Image (cartoon, rainbow, N blue to C red):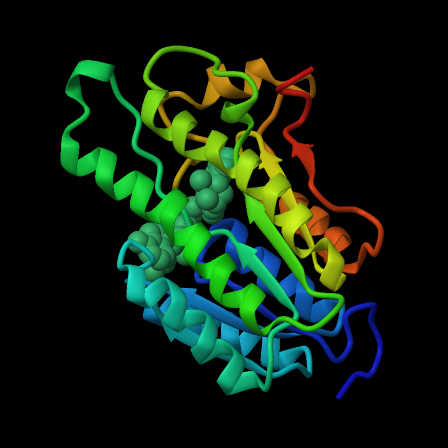
Amino acid sequence: MTTQGTLYGKVALVTGGSRGIGAATAVRLAREGADVAVSHVNGKEAAEDVVREVEALGRRAVAVRADLAQPAEAAAVVDAAAEALGGLDILVNNAGVGVLGPLETLSLAEVDRVLDVNVRGVFLASQAAAARMPEGGRIITIGSCIAQRVPGPGGTLYAMSKAALAGLTKALARELGGRGITANLVLPGPIDTDMNPADGPYAAGQAAMTALGRFGTADEVASMVACLAGATYVTGAEFSVDGGHAA
Ligand SMILES: NC(=O)c1ccc[n+]([C@@H]2O[C@H](COP(=O)([O-])OP(=O)(O)OC[C@H]3O[C@@H](n4cnc5c(N)ncnc54)[C@H](OP(=O)(O)O)[C@@H]3O)[C@@H](O)[C@H]2O)c1
């Protein structure tokens, strides 16, 4: 078992760690020495694959099912992760849903689902994590570049949900700073995942909106999360990992 890495001895929970940015983040944090819990809602097998990948790096890992749209589960997943791995130092609020479409077509059920997962779930998981985090705790939330610059129509609901995370992050930083806990927000641009495949119907337009002219990879976002997990004097801040989408 390795005893190397800036995060050695730390325990992390990555919500939505079964796929995409969350899976890459779980593995990155493990490479830096953290033990990692990954949550999933439907992707049990994918989450178990990530657990095996983390264990192959010599770290402990556990998969926990939680539908973050359910208030009780958003808090319970934090407790389950901490109980399985013996505490919690790092929460990565990654799980999210993307619902795009013309304003007039978005149903009340869609509005509720997006806000339940992307906003309320993040709030409740952060609340539960803060209640048990020691000094040096880290809350890192995955927002979106769309909260800074909406590139076209169809983003009202998703952009609204991701914009809420900026206020939450700054307020968490102020509230928890006295305990030595930091809160930061990562704003990915177009990242090649199941949610937004680089060969999808709107991919070329998204790539063209970036300065680098391409999609990013999940690992490129994960590297920023790992950096923030190790950063000691950074809080209440936002970090674009968007290939220059906001430039
Ligand atoms: N990809 C992009 O271009 C992009 C850009 C900006 C921001 N983001 C944000 O980055 C984060 C990760 O996105 P991604 O592209 O990696 O997405 P993804 O590939 O669709 O993965 C989504 C993850 O969230 C989990 N999840 C979905 N609904 C959930 C729920 N109700 N409760 C608990 N977990 C749930 C999924 O679990 P299961 O596997 O169990 O379904 C999965 O692990 C999201 O917050 C997203 O908004 C993505």
Q: Residue at x 43, y 79 (%)?
A: 80
Residue 3 visible to an observer of this rendering: yes
Looking at the image, how many numbered discs can be counted on the residues? 0
Where is residue 38 drawn, in percent x and y?
48, 68
In the image, residue 196 above or below residue 175? above
Camera-side residue of 14 and 137:
137
Q: What's the residue at 39%, 44% (across, down)? A: 118
- Closer to the camera in the image, 12 or 202: 12
For this view, does 42 lie left or right of residue 198?
left
Image location of residue 174, percent across then percent down: 68, 46
Residue 109, horizontal then vertical, whole percent: 15, 38
In the image, 130 versus 58, the foreground residue is 130
Q: Quadrant of residue 60?
A: bottom right
Q: Quadrant of the C terminus?
A: top right
Left or right of 103? Residue 137 is right
Quadrant housing the N terminus: bottom right
In the image, is residue 16 above or below residue 56? above
Q: Residue at x 50, y 24 (%)?
A: 146
User: In the image, what residue occupies the spot 64% across and 65% down?
Assistant: 90
Residue 192 visible, this orientation? no
